[in-house]
Amino acid sequence: MLAISFTFFVLFFCLVMGIKWFILLSLMMMFYPFFHFLNFNLSLFSKNLYISLDFFSFLMIILTFWIVFLSILSSMNILMSSFSKLFLILFYFLFFFLYMFFSVSNFFFFFFFFEATLIPTLFIIVGWGNKVERIKSGYYLFFYTLFGSMPMLMSIFFLKEMNFSLIFFFFNLKSTYYLMYMFLVISLLIKMPMFLVHSWLPKAHVEAPLSGSMILAGVLLKMGGYGLFRLMNLFKKFSNLNSIWIYISLWGGILSSFICLRQVDLKSIIAFSSVSHMSLVIVGILIFCYSSLIGSLMLMVSHGLCSSGLFFLANILYERSGSRSIFLNKGLMSMFPSLSIWWFIFCAFNMACPPSLNLISEIFLMNGLISWSFLFVFFLMFISFLGGVYNLFLFSFCNHGSMYSSIFFFNSCYLIEYFILYMHFFPIFFFFMKLFFFF
Amino acid sequence: MKNSFYMQSGLFFFSLMSSIIICLSSNSFLSMWMSMEINLFSMIPLISINQKIFSEKSTMMYFLIQGISSSIIIITIISNIKLTKSIMLIFIFMAIFMKLGLSPFHFWMISMIEGIKWNLAFIIMTVQKIIPICILMFFIHQKMIIFMCLMNSMIVALSGVTMYSMRKLMGFSSINHLSLMLISMILSKKIFKMYFLIYSLMTLSATKSMQLMNMNFLSQTMTIFKMSKINNLNNLIIFLSMAGIPPFLGFMPKMITIMLMMKSNMIFSVLVILLLNTITTFLYLRISLNNILMNLNFKKTFKVKKKTKLPLYLLFSPLYLLMS
């Protein structure tokens, strides 16, 4: 009753004030479910059925705030164009869905928002991308995720029949329901993405506009990791099957690092590097060890900021030179010496250099992983080493060498670009001093 | 002259509606069959009033198919065999599936919809389904219906994605939704009613917008659908809602049907239906792809007279209905 009256209130308000349809839309979609969740009593402030926060989801929400803010700020050329309002509305929708995704405690709503983030992402990638191939990459993104998550819907209702509840904390699944486990884990692994199902990610990144790829690398990849953490109680009973994903992603981390070295597209390199990092997160969560779990959380936060910053750096060059090829964007140290230091900082952070959160996270992860099996030393050694290799490769190709001869002039960098880079850099650097935030 | 035609169409429309009410309130199979015949003979003038090239063909096709299927139904009914356990049940199922335009007999509906106007296509896709489903409700023969529904969604997934005409696409989408609807009908009548209402709401807004913009083929989505920003968003919402993707309304009946199916342990058929529906999503995404592309290429001088209203009811997420 309250809900219906609220609807009419909003409609009436918009009619009276002459507010246009898009604001009305955003009002409806943004505030409406909130009113349901709150239900106008004070239970929000004490305890309720719908929303619960713990350290994992809290950090993910903060990351979401940060990345969405930065990616709206960094897409000024879209905000100046004619479709700016729709773009902003899509971002608000995406932000709202992500916020709810990280904070709901009901598995069905978890799934709902998991799927719902797909639509604004698809619109952003296909709508504001640059080339014709964006249609193909949009299809890839859409159908990979949908094929993964439609069976997940089935296993959600199976869990409901088993447990008579869909709240995360009451879950139980017998260790013989292998099929349900598979359906649950596959959709999250596709979203991560794990190595064998990763091929939507580079395509989506290459075709996406800057803000799309920033939010894709920054937050949307972390949804899978968050889901794995949330469903850990279920997954820990299937440790024999979990080892499949562990081996695939360890080996896939090495392979995707090798694939990085063969790429000629700046964005593609960064995308494959994020596949490699995410494989570490999968392993860290699925071995169910506390220190590696903390390491995965740290790696998710730090990689979200770091890869988002790298995408922003790649886009700065793309706006200036009109190309993302590493053969054309060369020798930029002579043009932008102060941008070059930012390239260095972000590449170094991406390869886990000392004063960064990435280093701490890798230390935590490796502690946990090696305690699980000592054989992992050799794999982790390769992943770490190749991480250094492709980041140096990225840095040296862009910043060293001679300038490409057909480039006649460059715009210099704007202050806001340095500002955005600093905003990416700041949390990675200074979380190092407040590590107990993650425990 | 024109006025008299309008009068006639109003008359036949009235008898169409009254035949449905007769069927819903009847207590014997004979009066149900009678309502079916009334329904047929009031639908045929409605199709043939506005003569187009194909409309004679589709009138004839509709008459023949409906006549054959209702004669099969009346033969099975009057043959006085115990209906629940006999081979005659298969006959009656076949006849009803033929009436509904479902999978082994779906070809007539796809080619018939090609020749009629959008508002009649809406009537055939939604309102005309009521009477056969109402008869089907009396025969709870679960396994066969479920098998046929799985076959339906497979056929839509296989052949629907290659279609080019908008009417055919809508026809295939109606087959797809109907297959889920029949399964929900087996499990719960209430959910079936809800599904039917939501499906007709979505089909109404889709057919209405396509009628307003005179859409006939998929290639026209590039131009006509994108007259203005509000049209763009409108069609986007409608077709993604029909596809049944989470934040839109169309997801809710699908989800509740799947919940019911899982409750009665139909794991395999849930899996098949979900995967086939994922392929069918391609059909809707193909229609709305040009809307997602976001760049408008309309002439500045050409203005659309009629202002289409945004279907806000489709934007109400399933959350709204679940939590109220």
Image: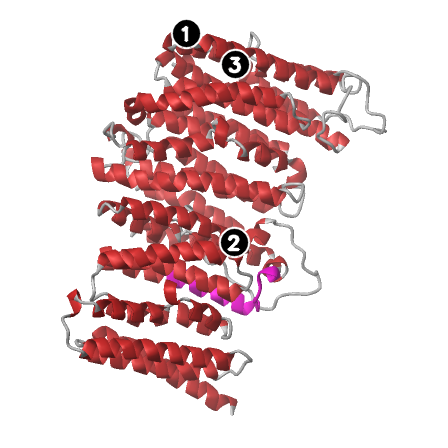
Residue at image point 71% right, 15% down:
A396
User: The disc numbered 2 marks a residue on which chain?
Assistant: B
The answer for how far apart the CA atoms under marks 1 and 3 are is 22 Å
In the image, residue B216 lies in the stretch drawn in magenta: yes
Where does the image place residue B129, in percent across and percent down from the top left? 34, 69
What is the magenta segment's predominant secondary structure? Answer: helix
Q: Residues within 10 Å of mark 3 (few under 14, many from 20)?
A: many
Residue at image point 65% right, 40% down:
A78
Q: Which residue carries the number 3 mark?
A: A358
- Vertical relation: B64 (above or below) B99: below
- Mark 2 belongs to which amino acid? Leu
Which type of secondary structure does the marked residue at label 3 adopt?
helix
Which type of secondary structure does the marked residue at label 1 adopt?
loop
User: The disc numbered 1 marks a residue on which chain?
Assistant: A
Q: Residues within 10 Å of mark 1 (few under 14, many from 20)?
A: few
* Residue span colored magenta: B198-220
Q: Which residue carries the number 1 mark?
A: A374
- Vertical relation: A293 (above or below) A7: above
Callout in the foreground (1, 3): 1
- Mark 1 belongs to which amino acid? Phe
Residue at image point 82% right, 25% down:
A404
Q: Residues within 10 Å of mark 2 (few under 14, many from 20)?
A: many
Q: Identify the disc placed on residue B236.
A: 2
- Mark 3 belongs to which amino acid? Asn
Which type of secondary structure does the marked residue at label 2 adopt?
helix
Q: Quadrant of the C terminus of chain A?
A: top left
* Residue A13 visible at all: no
